[in-house]
Image (cartoon, rainbow, N blue to C red):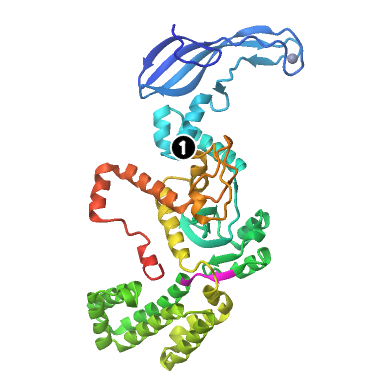
Amino acid sequence: MHDLLQLEQILPVGMREEGKWILILAENTAPPPERCKKCGHAPLYKHGKRRYTYADTPIHGKPVKVEIETRRYRCKACGTVVTLSSPSLDDKRVATRRLVQYVQDRCFETTFTWISKEVGLALNTVKGITQDYAAHLEEGVELETPRLLGMDELHILDKPRYVLVNLEMRSLFEMLAFRTGAHLTDYFRKLKDRDRIEWVVTDLWKPYEVVIGQQLPDARIVIDRFHVLKAVSSRLDELRKYLRVGLSAEDRVRLKKYLRWPLLRGEYNRTEKDIENIEYIRKHHIELYLALTLNEAFFSIYDAPNRAAGEKAFQDWKDSIPKDFRKYYRPVTDMVDRHHRDIFNFFECPITNGYTEAMNGVIRAMNRLARGSSFEILRARSLYYRIMRESGTVVTHTGDTKDISQPVSTMGGRIEKSYGTPISVLEAMAEREETRRKGPNLHRRMQILGPRRDGEAGTARSA
Ligand SMILES: [Zn+2]
């Protein structure tokens, strides 16, 4: 029979179809072991034959099982039974090595369910192969510690997680499964070259000061602008909810709608409709109109040309709050006073606008890629996919941010240094995933309808 298997020391002797399977019968032709591996005794005696079934790569789109008749040997001295194996077989997975490779090549690109169906391995085996592979990739990769580090919360797979981004290179640097001070402390303690970090742009998360202060004492902190502005917007919401008490149901809905878009779009991007709506608010709810104006005024603090001007603008703004409104804005004024240094560091940080944009890119991509996945797999997929695809190249630091997507030299080895997966690559992965899930027709329809708008509300003001 023609050697259709091409597996070392495995000789095919027959083949038949069995339902959805192709079953190949084979013999293990490996030479008998010379001596006992356990005690060294020789010779070993024949101890019958057994059939073992290994999964193999699909043929004609059908999953393949190889049933291998395998001779066994027994040591008379210690009783150990030795079963012949083959370098082509992965005994742990009960699969051929090439099938394990086949799964590795696909595991970050398609779903486990799909692979499991295609190759006939149990779902858990496919997950197991992927997990081992992810661990293997992680061992061989050393990401360059960023100079400008962005940190933000990301709620995926039912838990708040923590995302670390290289803001200079616009790449995903790390994903932490839990968002606690202890986790972050532990992470930074072990981080190589942590003194490389010059700036940390963060959301307003309580333990940030302590964790960064202790673990990255030389880094400077900026509270991201978007998170500050969100706190200000929430004041307007409070006021709106408070005023709602005396409103008709119709007016409540109207106010909510009328306030939302002008705020998100900001003073300079308003549509004619926004302006009309604001006029309505001015006529009928003067308090809300005043609050809207106060919010706008706060937003423009960020337009100040430098730190001193920004600090002055804030003081002026604070003084301009009407007495009756002070209690509504107390959380904002308290927040700015408490984090004064870090909020106004904005004016000195080399990355001021890129943070929200980068984070929104990551969040959009993660929300799509996370579906049906586990956190560990999602993390491996997001961090190592590109590295896996490009193994064989070495990326070295050139100091020029534009060079990051260009491998500098090919050394025929694994990637030794990388800045993490570019956010654009993550977004492209997520886009492909979406297309596959929904099918090409629906995807085309969605393109006609326009791009998805997840997270857009978050970018409108601060992008
Ligand atoms: Zn022995």
Left or right, residue 146 beside residue 33: left
| Residue visible at 26% across and 56% down in the picture | 450
Quadrant (top left/top right/bottom left/bottom right) for the N terminus: top left
The residue wearing badge 1 is 107
Q: How many discs mark residues in the rendered view?
A: 1
- Most distant residue in the bottom direction: 323
Q: Report x, y in % for residue 117.
A: 39, 31
State the residue at coordinates (63%, 65%).
211
Instruction: Look at the picture and state if 419 lies above or below 88.
Output: below
Q: Is mark 1 within 8 Å of ligand 1?
A: no
Judge left or right: residue 317 versus residue 454: right
Q: Secondary structure at mark 1?
A: loop
Classify the position of ligand 1 by quadrant: top left, top right, bottom left or bottom right.
top right
Q: State the residue at coordinates (61%, 14%).
A: 84
Q: Is residue 150 magenta?
A: no
- For the question of whether residue 409 can be seen, the reply is yes
Residue in front for this viewpoint, 181 or 5:
5
Q: Measured from the top left, where is residue 223 in percent x and y?
A: 53, 71
Q: Measured from the top left, where is residue 68 in percent x and y?
A: 51, 14
Q: Is residue 401 above or below residue 2?
A: below
Viewer can see residue 163: no
**Residue count near mark 1 (Cα–Cα under 10 Å), binned few <14, some 14–19, many ≥20:** many
Q: Residue at x 57, y 24 (%)?
A: 91
In this view, the residue in front, 217 or 76, is 217
Bounds of the magenta segment: 221-225
